[in-house]
Amino acid sequence: MGYLDGFRVTLKKWAGTRTESGRRVTLEYPEEVRPKPERFHGRHVLNRYEDGMEKCIGCELCAGVCPASCIYVRGKDNDPADPTSPGERFGFIYEINYLRCIHCDLCVEACPTEAITETKLFEFAFTNRSDAIYTKDELLVGDDGRPQQMPWENWDGGFDPAENTSGWMRATSPSGSADFEGIVAWAGELGYGVRGAEHGQSAEAAPAAEPTEQDDDGHGGY
Amino acid sequence: MDPLLTGDIGLTAVLVVLLKVVVAFAALMVGVMLMVWFERKVVADMQNRIGPNRAGPFGLLQTLADGIKLFFKEDLQPDRSDPFVFKLAPFLSLIPAFLTFAVIPIAGDFSGNKHGVVTIFGEKTFMQVADPQMGILFVLAMSSVAVYGVMLAGWASGSKYPLLGSVRATAQMVSYEAALGLSVAAVLLVAGTLRTNGIVSAQSGWNWNVWMTLFVPFLIFTVAATAELNRPPFDLVEAEQELVGGFHTEYSSIRFALFFLAEFMNTVTMSAVIVTLFFGGPSGPIPSGAPGWVADYVLPFAYFFGKLIIFLFMFVSFRATLPRFRYDQLMDLGWKFLIPLALGWFLLLTAVRVANDQGWNVVLTAAVTVVGLAIGAVLLRASIRSAEEKSDLNATLVDEEVS
């Protein structure tokens, strides 16, 4: 019955919501949420080192690589008496326009100090332009190392906001060298220290690489 | 003729007519609302989705919410449109949809020899708004008027996609109206009357036209009705992938809602027409001991509604299952298959009927007719083939000239 085969399919789906073929694949979204993938591309955060120093050095590589031109960065020399970041310069202005951001994660890949990473937050519906443009104050993690929560953001998405803000970082070898596979080669974060490796990349498999080069404060330079 | 309108027409009769009109209007509006919900819910089930479930219990009020939303949206009108016709078109689409339902009997006791007469406020009447002599022709006429709604909407929009959609719509609806009319003719032959009430009366006691006319007119009518409604798989008029939204691309706000409403109202009405013509409408077995209100209203309406739901479900499953026809396939199906088949079947039924009346041998007459029709079919087939060959040849010649 060539012409009627199609009807058999739809009727089967219609009749059997409990059978495998008729099983519903959609969720009642606001009440039920799907678990987020490990390397979900959500709203960005600007990370800080374990001692509270900002990781951003104002190099503008993220702004340069951004295909949507949504990042605006200006660097500034650190005050030697009261440095904001451990390096010579720090990100003085840092703005991301979420009306343009496509969450491609290229900024995260470009960043030399792992300063910018992405959380799993995607439920942030702003109602005006100034809310849409996140400033450095809003992007920077708080003193407890957790992302700041804006009033218009919904962080009840079934994940811990602070957990795994650097999924991509820990899933690839930051240097691009295959020798670094399975080696913890990323810097610590405020409130969390050096995070464990992702599944399949056990930190125990190989000893952590010795820092080859370090600045005076003991930051960076692997 | 409706017994209400025979003899003296008093105030009560006028009030009864008014009551019927109001009830039919309200029932149809609510019915359409539920039909939209039903369609969305069933299609969702067939696609492993949940469907509307936010507004009201089971999402029943979703259509109402959509309607209210559309009321408050901006009413846009293209600069190059024809303002008067642009505003007229939605109503030309909606009003015929309403009017068609007026001739559908929805209840009444058709068992025995009662012909569905009920008594309201001491006045004898039918459970339908009107029972004109032309009956089913009125349905066909209204579906022809509805073509104007679609056609003028596309033409008055002053935009190319609506125009293409409406040109398709016009050609499609006009072609399939022929098949529709010819399959109805077979029913009229059996029922012997044009009045919808008479058609239902003739079918009481399981003499449903669907087997009295041997299924084929029913199948033709269903296919042609789907095409007439512009529903999938014949929704070339709207063809989202090709024509944006088809004839209603330029419509927004409540004007769009009117088209949307008309489309679903037509679906409900066309299902009701199928039930009336082929499945005995509200007629069905009524136990002899049943009290008057059960026999007159509850049971017949339950029969009618049950049959209606089956056909609404059928239209919805068409939409969920069948891919859209290509335009030439649509025309081929209509002109080269459905119309000849409907015509041939009508002639066959006529021959059998005449044989019965004249006392001829029915089997022999039918056999002779079938042979005659088969010869006709072969000739038709041959002529179609030779025409196709000729057009292929022309196409080749044109290609050669071009190259």
Image (spheres, coloured by chain):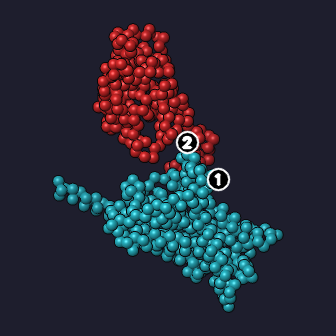
Q: CA distance from mark 2 to mark 1?
A: 18 Å
State the residue in front, B111 or B69. Answer: B69
- State which quarter of the image contains the N terminus of chain B: bottom right
Determine whether B175 is above or below B48 in the image. Answer: below
**Chain identity for the colour cyan used in the image:** B
Who's the residue at 63% across and 79% down the image?
Answer: B18
Query: Given the image, what chain letter belongs to the residue carrying mark 1?
Result: B
The residue carrying mark 1 is B57
Which residue is the extreme one toward the right?
B289
Q: Is residue A24 visible?
A: no
Query: Given the image, what chain letter belongs to the residue carrying mark 2?
Result: A
Which residue is the extreme one toward the front?
A81
Q: Taking A175 as reference, is B14 left or right?
A: right
Determine whether B299 is above or below A70 in the image. Answer: below
The percent coordinates of residue A167 (x first, y second) are 45, 25
Q: Is residue B28 visible?
A: yes
Chain A: colour as depicted: red
